[in-house]
């Protein structure tokens, strides 16, 4: 039995590419155009560097590029709207010009950034606040008819690590999503255009991150495509006693396998080439023999 036999999901079509949920795991490649992200801050903060990294991710087999101009690591400072626009828009515009067929996601909590990015070629909004920070976000994506991924978080990056007291972690995450999905639909967002992300590392302790990966299948009952982003995160560093995020590739691989076994549809990763191989093998095991060869 395959995952889609239990929870059939409506496919997404981005730039002519069909995302048939359950057929295989799709790769969202991280492109942080920030000076202070936890893993690669400052590496791609110039337009030329961002374009080169986008080219590398595309050549490595990425399915969606996720561009973010605001760091969301713990204690990250909030930048101005103007600064976020200045970081994100030139990159989206340049990538769209050079790669007209590659789906682009923008990692933002601001409707104004989302609107401007869509105008220059973005296809998808990835909102780490679950569209709670900006009340204009859900009406915007409804108007533009683009998909949105809603992530679970408590508080803000400045406060989230003090907000980890849960009575029933997965049940509370599921309840958050039920409320946010209902809010999105009430604003006119198509139910079929909503994805979810349990927010590994966001208002979660080390043990809670592991619990999410163990019990991820609980969230399949929400019948939304599910994104999981474990890449290079601190819980992996804790296990491996590895302070350097760039040296957590194989730990990330193990976490991606766990996510796929639990029903993840997309994994958000930095190391696309390595995780592409990981996903192909994991898909062949958990989605059936044909999945691993249809990439």
Image: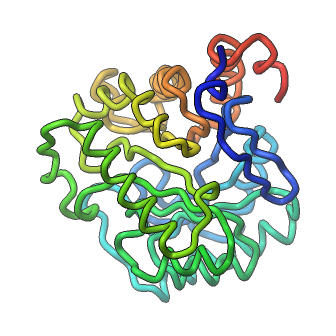
Colour approach in the figure:
rainbow
Quadrant in the picture for residue 62: top right
The percent position of residue 268, horizontal first and vertical second, equals 56, 43
From the viewer's perspective, tell me whether residue 116 is left or right of residue 244.
right
Q: Quadrant of the N terminus?
A: top right
What residue lies at 53% left-to-right and 43% top-to-bottom? 227
From the viewer's perspective, tell me whether residue 50 is left or right of residue 110.
right
State the residue in front, 104 or 232.
Answer: 104
Q: Compared to 216, does 278 lie above or below?
A: above
What residue lies at 23% left-to-right and 37% top-to-bottom? 169
State the residue in front, 158 or 126.
Answer: 126
Q: Compared to 173, does 138 lie above or below?
A: below
The percent position of residue 100, horizontal first and vertical second, equals 87, 64
Quadrant in the picture for residue 31: bottom right
The percent position of residue 177, horizontal first and vertical second, equals 39, 52
Q: Quadrant of the C terminus?
A: top right
From the viewer's perspective, tell me whether residue 112 is left or right of residue 73.
right
Most distant residue in the bottom direction: 82
The percent position of residue 157, horizontal first and vertical second, equals 28, 61
What residue lies at 27% left-to-right and 28% top-to-bottom? 238
Quick check: can you spot residue 49? Answer: no
Q: How many marks?
A: 0
What residue lies at 55% left-to-right and 51% top-to-bottom? 195
Quick check: can you spot residue 30? Answer: yes
């Amino acid at each position: 039995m395959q995952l889609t036999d239990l929870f059939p999901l409506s496919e997404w079509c981005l730039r002519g590419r069909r995302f048939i949920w359950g057929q295989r795991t799709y790769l969202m490649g991280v492109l942080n155009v920030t000076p202070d992200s936890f893993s690669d801050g400052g590496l791609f903060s110039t337009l030329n560097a961002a374009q080169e990294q986008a080219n590398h991710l595309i050549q490595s087999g990425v399915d969606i590029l996720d561009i973010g101009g605001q760091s969301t690591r713990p204690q990250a400072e909030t930048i101005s709207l103007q600064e976020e626009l200045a970081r994100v828009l030139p990159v989206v515009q340049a990538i769209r010009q050079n790669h007209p067929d590659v789906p682009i996601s923008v990692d933002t909590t601001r409707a104004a950034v989302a609107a401007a990015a869509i105008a220059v070629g973005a296809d998808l909004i990835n909102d780490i606040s679950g569209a709670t920070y900006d009340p204009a976000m859900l009406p915007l994506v409804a108007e533009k008819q683009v998909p949105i991924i809603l992530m679970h978080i408590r508080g803000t990056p400045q406060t989230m690590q003090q907000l980890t007291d849960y009575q029933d972690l997965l049940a509370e995450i599921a309840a958050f999503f039920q409320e946010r999905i209902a809010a999105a639909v009430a604003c006119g967002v198509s139910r079929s255009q909503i994805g979810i992300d349990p927010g590994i590392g966001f208002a979660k302790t080390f043990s809670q991150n592991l619990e999410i990966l163990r019990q991820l299948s609980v969230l399949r009952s929400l019948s939304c495509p599910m994104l999981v982003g474990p890449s290079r995160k601190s819980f992996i560093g804790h296990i491996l006693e590895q302070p350097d995020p760039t040296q957590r590739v194989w730990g990330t691989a193990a976490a991606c396998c766990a996510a796929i076994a639990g029903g993840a549809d997309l994994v958000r990763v930095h190391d696309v080439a390595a995780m592409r191989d990981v996903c192909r093998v994991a898909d062949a095991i958990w989605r059936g023999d044909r999945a691993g060869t249809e990439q």
